[in-house]
Amino acid sequence: MNFHQKKIDKKKKMATELKDLTKRSEDYSKWYNELVVKAELAEQADVRGCMVIRPYGYAIWEKMQRVLDDMFKETGVQNAYFPLLIPKSFLSKEAEHVEGFAKECAVVTHYRLKTNDTHDGVVVDPAAKLEEELIIRPTSETIIWNTYKNWIKSYRDLPILCNQWCNVMRWEMRTRLFLRTSEFLWQEGHTAHATREEAEERAKQMLKVYAKFAEEYMAVPVIQGVKSETERFAGALDTYTIEAMMQDGKALQSGTSHFLGQNFGKAFDVQFLNKDNKVEYAWATSWGVSTRLMGALIMTHSDDNGLVLPPKLAPLQVVIIPIGKGDQMAMLDEKAEAILKNLKAMGISVKYDNADNKRPGFKFADYELKGVPVRVVLGARDLEKGLVEVMRRDTLEKENVAIEGIEDYIKNLLNDIQQNIYQKAIKFRDAHIYECDNYDEFKERIKEGGFFLCHWDGTEETEAKIKEDTQATIRCVPFMFEQTEGTDMVSGKPAKARVLIARAY
Amino acid sequence: MNFHQKKIDKKKKMATELKDLTKRSEDYSKWYNELVVKAELAEQADVRGCMVIRPYGYAIWEKMQRVLDDMFKETGVQNAYFPLLIPKSFLSKEAEHVEGFAKECAVVTHYRLKTNDTHDGVVVDPAAKLEEELIIRPTSETIIWNTYKNWIKSYRDLPILCNQWCNVMRWEMRTRLFLRTSEFLWQEGHTAHATREEAEERAKQMLKVYAKFAEEYMAVPVIQGVKSETERFAGALDTYTIEAMMQDGKALQSGTSHFLGQNFGKAFDVQFLNKDNKVEYAWATSWGVSTRLMGALIMTHSDDNGLVLPPKLAPLQVVIIPIGKGDQMAMLDEKAEAILKNLKAMGISVKYDNADNKRPGFKFADYELKGVPVRVVLGARDLEKGLVEVMRRDTLEKENVAIEGIEDYIKNLLNDIQQNIYQKAIKFRDAHIYECDNYDEFKERIKEGGFFLCHWDGTEETEAKIKEDTQATIRCVPFMFEQTEGTDMVSGKPAKARVLIARAY
């Protein structure tokens, strides 16, 4: 490292300190909250519990959407759009569903405002009261099955495979950006089938799509499994889930897929003539992922310098920064343009930042904070030797690389980063999964986080006791581990299988 | 035409009759309403004034979104997301804006339901009343400018160029699918600038983007112009518009772009330090197009057989239908697969429909109804001569074409259809634009529809009188016609220019 390099590193350090990000080891929760805001992903809106998703955050979400949407369509799913507002009475048609959702929804009661008496504001016009209140959708099973009723007459009309990308609203008391907000963005798939088998198969198929997306694109390893009865979606016979481990050892439920049986078919009277010419209720699934995935993405990979993004979802994959002065700049610009052009032709998103009102050190810190996977520094002196400096964001390692063939080097490096952060996340997770057979030990160790594989007797009582004692919940009966019979660590009763227990977001 | 062909045509006629679409000449309005439903584009939801956009309709909207989104991004615009709900008090901060929007909005007053006394339904929980009511966004200037306040300190933070794709809600009393619904989907761009000139330039630039999209993709010719004061967006200094002519001679406002001056900057106290180090209010624009474009698309091109779609926006561009029996089918399938593969490689969306539970005639009518631009019939007998039958949806003309090189023929045909329907629409529109200088004549002729270019004295009184007498409105001061001074046909006063007057959707 020469003097020039040292100076840059010092500036970089200063810029980082300016950003003033709390360290994960100090306060993981605070680190997350600060990071989301400082990296300009999202911020709290001046509307209770709602967020503004800023352009940089939204660009990541758009990339997620694009990939997921293509994956859905490959399985035959089509997009559609159903109303935002749901008549109140629809909610009570499915008994369990109403219990799960009625308690936390925004209610529209009027359809007009009018000028107030002092003519300096507006008030609700009492004359414009709705006969039946409307609910802002917390999820759309009810309005969609009310519509499917008119689409389904015969088994020939099935399956129906619809998805919608939309906003939903659940009134949350304690909110956190991306993880839990009153309004959030998501997709919700709703399918109708002629047979139970086909519906169950679809619910499982979509879980696999989610798992593939999480692992191959987000580089977030997930554990697939099925929820306990207590943790099921309101109205489902089975809820399948993918659970990811954050760096504090807590679980984040990242996507769910529900086999709804005939519950909504019956609630909304969706009958059809089956192949045997008999009338039957349609079978249903629903499945969704939301902007919560942003939280999972951020918390799995990022570090004390800011975001670490998987190259496949990074809005900007490469940034090129020149270091030079005066008459060196023309030459640097020219070199950069050539690399830029080649990278773009390879489908790599790249930006050349030669803005002269910000110092390199500031730029370095800013792109690190934003998690741009690869940084290329074009230094006049290095260039004389045919070299550029390449830094990979995941490890912060720097290397001097020949400018000749730099494009292929970068392409490989992006792949390498994608794989590396995924492997790192797997390694971290696997090091924090424990089999545990002793409840006292469990209660002690759960404080440090981690996933615990414990025998469970299958009763709600045991589940409730664990939750009360430790705040941990049964995340799922995981599919990936070989199951053995044993003894419930709490009740001492026989248990058929180990379940995954963790504290969760 | 051989016997075989006649039989098919008869079946086709039957199938068409089954569809039973009202003719445009009989009742244009009814034709539209039926077409939207029968072509499975959208339907009325069981929620007052709201629609369900069905997969086929949504697929067209998605294509529109994709193209527009790319066009926006090319001009530097980024997507973001702002809250659905707006505090009531925000609405009254801009005086004209509240007048324009407060009267037709959905009001959220409570955030919880509870089980009713008889335990068979849910009621609003009176304990969960909001301190301040929240409005479902009818448009987002207020919430967005309330956010921009925190983003803008210096001219260096400008411009901000955000767009969001979202749902909005305006309580409409009389609704029509796509044209006017309480909830609709749209994009709304909101930009902030350091200078008046830059903001005005942006407002005009986005109008041009809309016009280009309408003409090059939707094949809908539009007249660009500026609105009269009366017809301006609530809170704007200037509203630019694109106006399209439907087949009944009525105008459909297809997109608007607003120069908002400093109105929202002042209302939400968005000040910044300009280059001269002086504090100034930010300058604003907003611009939007909505699912209303679907209405314009349908009404411009479609005919008594159903939809006619421009190939660039058709979800399915080509359908291939085999006609043969028994052992002929294997050969037909094989031929079709080869064409299918080649067309897909050319980026053309194509479907091979060899379903054996529907007759060719039914399929023909159905794909005509859905507006698939090109139909290819693979007949066993024709194939022996190396021919296939190709029908273009726009003119319904059929031609026997050599199967050798059919892919290039189809590609050219798609381009030709795109051009042809655009030219047809221009021709129709131009034949229905009239200069008119006599008010009695105007009152008589406006009943038949059409666009009228008339001298206007610039007063609200004249504008109001025309509207009262004829239901027609000043659509805009158009940019495309050479302007001459003259005499207002209503008041007899001097007029600086001709304006475009029409009845409108």
Image: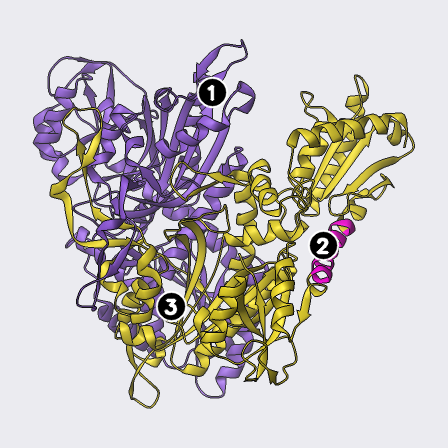
Chain colours: A purple, B yellow
In this orientation, does residue B228 appear?
yes
Q: Is residue A147 magenta?
A: no
User: Residue A150: x, y in percent?
Assistant: 47, 28
| Snapshot quadrant of residue A233 | top left
Q: Residues within 10 Å of mark 2 (few under 14, many from 20)?
A: many
Q: CA distance from mark 2 to mark 3?
A: 35 Å
Query: Quick check: B487 above or below B424?
Result: below
| Snapshot quadrant of residue A196 | top left
Mark 1 belongs to chain: A
Task: Say the numbered circle drawn on residue B234.
Answer: 3
Write down the residue under mark 2: B421
Rendered residue at 28%/54% (across/down): B135
**Is label 2 or label 3 in front?**
3
The amino acid beneath tag 2 is Ile
The amino acid beneath tag 1 is Glu
Task: Say the numbered circle drawn on residue A198.
Answer: 1
Mark 3 belongs to chain: B
Q: Is residue A147 left or right of residue B90?
A: right
Q: Are marks 2 and 1 on the same chain?
A: no
Rendered residue at 25%/47% (across/down): A182
The amino acid beneath tag 3 is Ala
Magenta span of residues: B412-428
**Quadrant into which the N terminus of chain B falls:** top right
**Majority secondary structure of the magenta segment?**
helix
